[in-house]
Amino acid sequence: MSEPKNLDAKAPGGPIAHRWDKHRFDMKLVNPANRRRYTVIVVGSGLAGGAAAATLGEQGYNVQCFCYQDSPRRAHSIAAQGGINAAKNYRNDGDSIHRLFYDTVKGGDFRARESNVYRLAQVSTNIIDQCVAQGVPFAREYSGYLDNRSFGGAQVSRTFYARGQTGQQLLLGAYQALARQIAAGTVAMHARSEMLDVVVVDGRARGIITRDMVTGKIERHVADAVVLATGGYGNLFYLSTNAKGCNTTAIWRAHRKGAFFANPCYTQIHPTCIPVTGEHQSKLTLMSESLRNDGRIWVPKKKGDTRSPQQIPEAERDYYLEVRYPSFGNLVPRDVASRNAKQVCDQGRGVGPGGLGVYLDFADSIKRLGKAKIAERYGNLFDMYAQITGENPYELPMRIYPAIHYTMGGLWVDYNLMSTIPGLFVAGEANFSDHGANRLGASALMQGLGDGYFVLPATVPNYLAGIKPGDLTIEHAAFGQAETEVVGRVKRLLGNIGGTRTVDSFHRELGKLLWDECGMGRNDAGLRRAIARIPTLREEFWKGVRVPGEGSDFNQELEKAGRVADFLELGELLCRDALHRAESCGGHFREESQTEDGEAQRDDEQFSYVAAWQYTGDLAKPALNKEPLTFEYVKPSQRSYK
Amino acid sequence: MKLTLKVWRQKNSKAVGEFKTYQADHVSPDMSFLEMLDIVNQDLIMKGQEPIAFDHDCREGICGMCSLMINGVGHGPKTAITTCQLHMRSFSDGETVTIEPWRALPFPIIKDLVTDRSSFDRIIQAGGFISASTGAAPDGNSIPIAKPDAEQSMDAAACIGCGACVAACPNGSAMLFTAAKLAHLSFLPQGKIERHQRVLNMITVHDAEGFGNCTNMGECSAVCPKGISLDTIARLNRDLVMAALKGLEPTVGIPVEG
């Protein structure tokens, strides 16, 4: 490995509460009359990308927006159920910008950058105002004022919500703002377009290469700056709560062109998903975390107990979270709940087919509150569960198991959300910036919209003000070279006429390997096994994958193949990052690093930094760069939920 | 379970399509409908044939990407769910299942079961928004909204834009889709300001895209996975009359692309 370099986040100094204000004043502006001469490419149309494209369009820039779905309204932000946090303190229960900042840094297990998190807490209040103005139908009280609920174990009620469809409503708000700009001619939308490479000219991001997913045409697009808002890489594990199309290609291609990849091993596992039913399983469905407010989690005390749950008497049940964490009980944070479920299943006490499940039991709540009350609170979730499993959760306890849900890691960005490639900005789940090693519930929507509506529309113009607009065309040699590479890759993927395995079969194998060796628990030996296996799997893929059809056609297998090829590279980096970080923190649990009673043990002396990996041309030898983390306002402490 | 599938296959928008028959053996009742198609596709690929193209993404009933007429019904036999939420236990062993794409003029077929629904986006672009630029918003609580209004707005806003309403309608009308967006916005004080111009503009583009008119058949609402009510269309019609009484003219151009 090359000598580690320390990265500069370019975060402003001074009192943390004034940093963003001061920075906004210090940044350069572009004259309104000149803005249309600058072109900004935005890849992804979810909360971060959709909001950024709409807002930059409103400001008068010439925006080109891309998404792989058939409409920008379908980005996976739409699936977020629970809510969005904001430090409004409408409940007068002690919330403040500083408290949201504090909770987020602590919840992230002290692996996030303080300046960014503080800014996020600051803009959180503006997000709610903006969304209300756009017509997002948030839940209301009878007074007509906005309703709030507490979420994810937070001690204050700061979560705004629109039934169980908050992500959908926020995304539709951004989508409609985007539609308005498309109509106004400031944004050109390219749906069913997949970015396959970023074009770097003289060290700056100047465009992208895309594939039109309907015609198969490979296209060049030039710009003065490029924003990637392409979401997380949870589908690396094949089974996750992500949409089937979610992928890493945009950020991975950018990584190969020079953007550092930060903390890939920080993945979040959500404790309450519906368990796998068999080999055919294509994705996992999340059941809102709010269920843990009234459901009790348990497994049989005895190993291999196959009796039906109703036949297991109270004395033979282990309510393990209530026993182990008396003060938080079933409401411990996501990482703790997930790890404990794995432990009891590893002990052979899991329930349901394959023994990979635990009970989430509402019998006590139904007895106490009545079935009607439970139906009012969770009716839609119970229906969803019954639809998928064929079991009635009012009578039988639900079976749940953890699943990959979110990735805190992503491309490294500075305070301006710019990657290590000048002119390449990264927003939302695609960057690494705000959640440290563990994200709190209802904070993903906040970050996506914060980046899109408020941060990028200030920092992208600052970058543009320093460069001359539109001095390049797609005829530049760098575009030709990038296009040639993309075309060659497509050809190679289609080339194995006699291939013996499908794309899905490789993806499943990679996913299972990562889930086993780099999932909820990770150890040195397992990670080394994965690191040894992935390169050979990659080789087998390129030699043996069968991709039918043509490149110049609508070809879903080809789309999947390109994405899995990139997952096969990122998977190795993820394991290498997990191996090097010989501490436990947040979602990254190294079995060697735990406290006496089995809780995650951080090692601040050695690992209080962001690991930003640099592509060297050799996947086996990525270079580690570090951004040291210093905590001026929130003193690192051991998280405890006992 | 074993099923016989009759699936619409069509190479591209210009090609002539046809039904082809496939056997789906080893179907588990725990599979979702799309997982059943995944398995059929894996077999087709290994047999050297092209897999069946179909749209899907979130597979949890919210993105609106999946579609499919299943035995002639949008999103299949169960009510208030999308195709991706439909499980094979809703079918019986030995059954023959017919699978078609949405059939409507403004939804041209791209390939097999995949259609182009960008006409929906163009209806929204005509006015399905509140013109509130980022940064101009007052405090969220400065606009109190009566709870029943917020609830009715949310009922309409639940639309996922899948297009089942159009496919089910004998007239190929997108009135339920359009009306849902109008109701979402017009129940809110913020959305009332542009209310009448909005309905006029959206309906102008709706018609120009080739969607038919509403004759109150109610097929749309019956297949809607989110249960959007026919009442929204009555509300649309009232607003359209108000726009005419005010003497408003559409302010959108007619899109060239159809």
Image (tube, coloured by chain):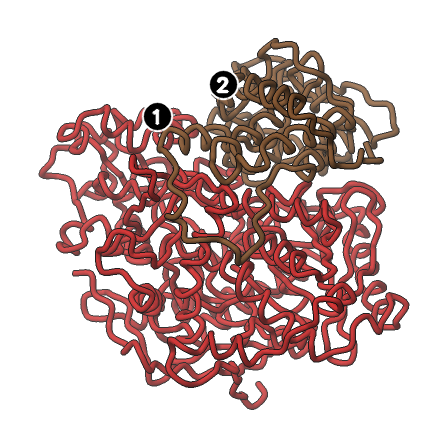
Chain colours: A red, B brown
Q: Where is residue A410 in the image (x, y as percent from the top left)?
A: 53, 66
Residue A380 sits above or below residue A176 on the image = above
For label 1, the crowd category at 10 Å Cα-Cα, with few meaning under 14, some 14 to 19 and many 20 or more, is some
Q: Position of residue B203 (x, y in %)?
A: 69, 26
Q: Residue at left 41%, top 53%?
A: B139
Residue type at mark 1 is Glu
Along the viewing direction, whichever of A359 and A279 lies nearer the viewer: A359
What number is the disc on residue B79?
Answer: 2
* Left or right of A378 in this view: A55: right
Residue, far front: B246
Q: In which quarter of the image is residue B24?
A: top right
For label 2, the crowd category at 10 Å Cα-Cα, with few meaning under 14, some 14 to 19 and many 20 or more, is some
Count of numbered circles in the view: 2
Front position among marks 1 and 2: 2
* Left or right of A133 in this view: A566: right
SS of the residue under disc 2: loop
Question: Label 1 is found on which chain of the structure?
Answer: A
Q: Name the residue under label 1.
A: A391
Residue B218 sits above or below residue A489 on the image = above
Question: Label 2 is found on which chain of the structure?
Answer: B
Q: Residue at left 69%, top 25%?
A: B247
Residue A142 sits above or below residue B2 on the image = below
* Left or right of A345 in this view: B167: right
Residue, far left: A315
